[in-house]
Amino acid sequence: MKILIWNNFKLLERKGGPPTYLYNLKQAVLKEKCDKIDFLDLYETGTAKKLSLYKRLRKRLVQKLMQAKKYNYLRFKLFLYGMEKADPELPAIDFDQYDFIHFHSTADYFQFRKIRHHFKGRTILTIHSPKPPHLELIEDVFKMDASRLTAGELERIKYIDDFSLNDCDLLLFPCEEAMEPFINSWDTFAGSIQHKKVIYTPTGIPPATFTASKETVRQKWGIKEDSIVFSYIGRHNGIKGYDLLKDAAALILEQYPDVYFLIAGAEHPLKGLEHERWIEVGWTTDPHAVTNASDCFILPNRETFFDLVLLEVLSLNKKCILSFTGGNKFFKQFGSSDLLYFYDLQKEDLADAIREFIDHQRYLSPSYTRELYNNNFTGEQFLHNYLEALNEVSG
């Protein structure tokens, strides 16, 4: 059995999404000296590098000439044209040496469609976004309101997702719950997967590491040793539940004088609380030091696929307060008292979960989340489960 991972982007340790998912898989492949998986790595070609530079220069020029809204709409139109008309650059390799080609976005799959009928193996599709890809492109990439697009424009970008979902041979997700965001807001998804073979393979990661000690981080930000610290790392937007965390934190900070919130990640599009015990670290090269310096991590996603941050938290042996949504639900089966769920996506419910930790949970037994990580979510287990799942359907 031979598998080609279709990545026309660079694999990065802390990018999130497909770049980090596949970075973790590749680390395990290299460590285990696995010869069953190849990575396309198309971005490394000379042509791709030149094209990337050209795109960056073009973007700067066009941005200067146009207003933001017009610029984003132009980008959207160019994307549609590129998807429908342009022929992708393909490497000079024999695709038929592979039993499977695994795609990690509907856009990549759609571009492959012109040579799809020549490929004798089977195609796999994994969608990593916390919302349907066409909505993520419209709202988060092109910064547009879907309701302002014409019916034809919306149909064209949604067709990319629908075609890819229906044309692929196999779907691969980390767990059944990870499909929840698509079932909720992609009208054709539930019907399409009724006729598909869906494989479930939980993600794994190398253990999270950090440079600065707990004491160093707390001292840097003026946090007393005996204070209670909650951490959050990630995007500052609504789908990640950042605004929900802010609203709940405002209630907690008013009630408890010895509680701090230590927040990492770029402070946009949403801004943090104006409070001396709400600390915005910003983007950092040592994010896991922030988690390690805290007593408990908060993962307040409104919608989620299968958040790699949670696996990092487990590997650091930290307790976690998390929303009962999407891939977060998968971890309920382990019955860990170190994972404290809140069920209603309201500030009061999250605040109650935080109070529960402050008043009771922090006094209970030490965290055993690292044991949960070691038994289920290492990079080696990820590779093993991935190969085993594909081997079962390769006959």
Image (tube, helix red, strand yellow):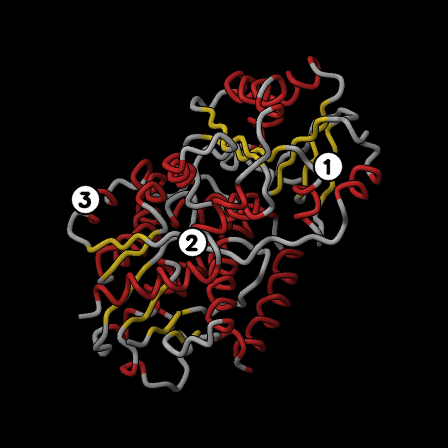
Query: For the residues carrying marks 1 and 3, which lies nearer the camera in this image?
Result: 1
Q: Which residue sits furthest front? A: 365
Residue 219 % position (x, y): 84, 38
Classify mark 3: helix, strand or loop: helix
Report which residue position mark 3 lands on: 191
**Quadrant placement of the C terminus:** bottom left
Residue 90 % position (x, y): 40, 79
Residue under the point 49% across and 36% down: 239
Q: Total of numbered circles in the picture?
A: 3
- Residue 131 located left or right of residue 214: left
Tag shown at residue 392: none
Q: On screen, 226 above or below 235?
A: above
Depth order, front residue of 268/357: 357
Residue 46 % position (x, y): 55, 82
Q: On screen, 353 above or below 46?
A: above
Report which residue position mark 2 lands on: 203
Name the amino acid, label 1: Glu
Query: For the residues carrying marks 2 and 1, which lies nearer the camera in this image?
Result: 2
Report which residue position mark 1 lands on: 280
Name the amino acid, label 2: Thr
State which quadrant residue 13 falls in. Answer: bottom right
Classify mark 2: helix, strand or loop: loop
Mark 1–mark 3 Cα distance, whole angstroms, equals: 43 Å
Classify mark 1: helix, strand or loop: strand
3 or 2: tag closer to the N-terminus? 3
1 or 3: tag closer to the N-terminus? 3
**Residue 185 visible in the shown view:** yes
State which quadrant residue 35 falls in. Answer: bottom left
Q: Which residue sits furthest left? A: 195
* Disc 1 residue crowd, few under 14, some 14–19, many 20+, Cα 10 Å: many
* Disc 2 residue crowd, few under 14, some 14–19, many 20+, Cα 10 Å: many
Name the amino acid, label 3: Gly
